[in-house]
Structure formats: structure tokens, C-alpha cells
Image (cartoon, rainbow, N blue to C red):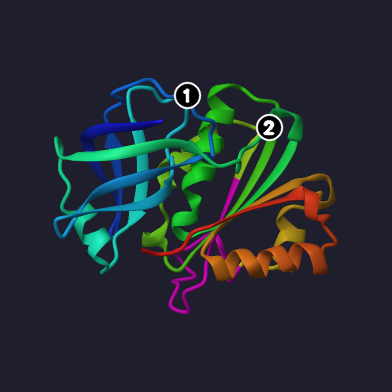
Amino acid sequence: MEMDTNILKVIQRTHNVKSFRCEPKARVDFTAGQFMKVTLKVNQENQSKYFSISNSPTEKGYYEFTKKITESDFSKALDRLKAGDPLTLDLPKGSFTLKEEDKKAAFLSGGIGITPLRSMIQYAVDMNLKVNIVLLYGNHTEKDIVFREDLDALSDHSQNVRIIHTLDSPDIDRNRWRGRTGLINAQMIKEEVPDYQERKFFICGPPQMVLALNKTLKDDLEIQADRIKTEKFSGY
């Protein structure tokens, strides 16, 4: 459903990531993990891009999308948005969603690819779904971790959610950083998700990461294709 709406609030998530909360001019039901089309004025012309819905259906009163701010014209136009500014949403779209019958899920993500997974985890905790979730979330540095407070709070609140952060910067202070280091790979999955053969995998992040991890799951860990769901995040 397409609706003209306006910005309710802009939230600075990290040094270069913002969330944009939009007023719901009409009620549109969506499933955690789905995405929407966002249209706004860029250089006096309407332009549209697709973004995952980063809030859960249980978080009422707004529709939220989250974006890494880059040097593109579209991104710069987003960066200038403030409360009250107009834009158009078209939602919901997509089937990158978690079902309670999945029972055990493993989420593999990098960077801004966390947005639909954050929505799924929030929904699973709020609804007390009987789904066990393990998230491996990779970033370059600690300051790049999007939704860190939300994710850690959800993990603390629910015995069914476990969050593992990993950083791949060569300049990590090992005396201060207590999480994992390095890219997500087969060995890390085996160590952190020992029951990986029993889980359904959800991969979300930059296209190259998604392709590499999809291949790792199939070739190295022998996960069947029907137990892998993917969502690629192109930068714009």
C-alpha cells in the first residue's frame, strides 16, 4: 500500500547510520523482516529506493527504516530530512521472514544488513516465540555496530536469543574488545553455532558477503539450499 507521510523523528544510530521514523497515515500490517519502497525529492525529482523495515510490528505508531549515510545524492537528501518533512512509503514487500515453526534459526549479518534481523529478533522476544536465535554480526570497528544497545538488551532479556559480535579491523584493541575478531567463516559458525545442522540460516548484508556466506554454508557446512534465506543490501 502506498501512502504519503512525513518524518516523525530522525535517530542517529552510529557515526554514519540514521533511522527515520515515519508517521503511519494508514494502518498497514507487515511481517518482521519485510521491506518497503521509500520515495522522496532528490534534486527536485522523485527518486525511490528500497529499505528493510527496522522496527518490529509490535512497536506501534511508526514505520522505521535505517540507512548508512553515503555520498550519493539520495543518501545526502535523506541526511537532510528532519521531523515534518514529506516522503512516500509503499509497503509491505518481501518474504525474508521468520516463522515460529522454524524452531532454531541462525542469523548471519554485516553492517547495515542488521536491520531486518533486528526487527525479527525484537518481534520474537515481544511475542515470546518459541524460536531459538543465534546472531553472528560482523562489523569493521566497535563504533560501526548498529542497534548495539537494542541487540544486547534483547539478548539479556531472552534466553532464546544469543548475540555474537565480531570485528574485522586490524587495529582492534584486544585488551578492551571482548568479542570475536575476524570475518564470519565456517570455523566461527562451527564454534558459535555447534548445532548448525539443526538450524535455518538467514543471511543479510552486502552482496559479496551474502554470496560468500551462502557458498560457505552449502560447500563447507553442507547446509541444504532450502534451509538458507538471503537478503542482499546494495549501497546507495
Residue 78 painted magenta: no
Query: From which residue to which does the magenta span run?
Result: 163-183
Q: Residue at x 40, y 64 (%)?
A: 235
Numbered mark located on residue 99 in the image: 2
Secondary element at image label 1: loop
| Alpha-carbon span between mark 1 and mark 2 | 16 Å
| Label 2 packing within 10 angstroms: few (<14), some (14-19), many (20+) | some
Q: Residue at x 41, y 46 (%)?
A: 147
Q: Which amino acid does label 1 sit on?
A: Asp
Quick one: 105 or 175, which is closer to the camera? 105
Q: Residue at x 61, y 22 (%)?
A: 128
Q: Is 70 on the left-hand or right-hand side of 183?
A: left
User: Is 51 situated above or below 213?
Assistant: above
Q: Point out the image quarter for the C terminus.
A: bottom left
Numbered mark located on residue 29 in the image: 1
Q: Residue 218 at what x, y percent from top left? A: 80, 63
Quick one: 27 or 64, which is closer to the camera? 27
Q: Residue 213 at what x, y percent from top left? A: 67, 65
Q: Is 178 on the left-hand or right-hand side of 50?
A: right
Q: Residue 94 at what x, y percent from top left? A: 55, 42
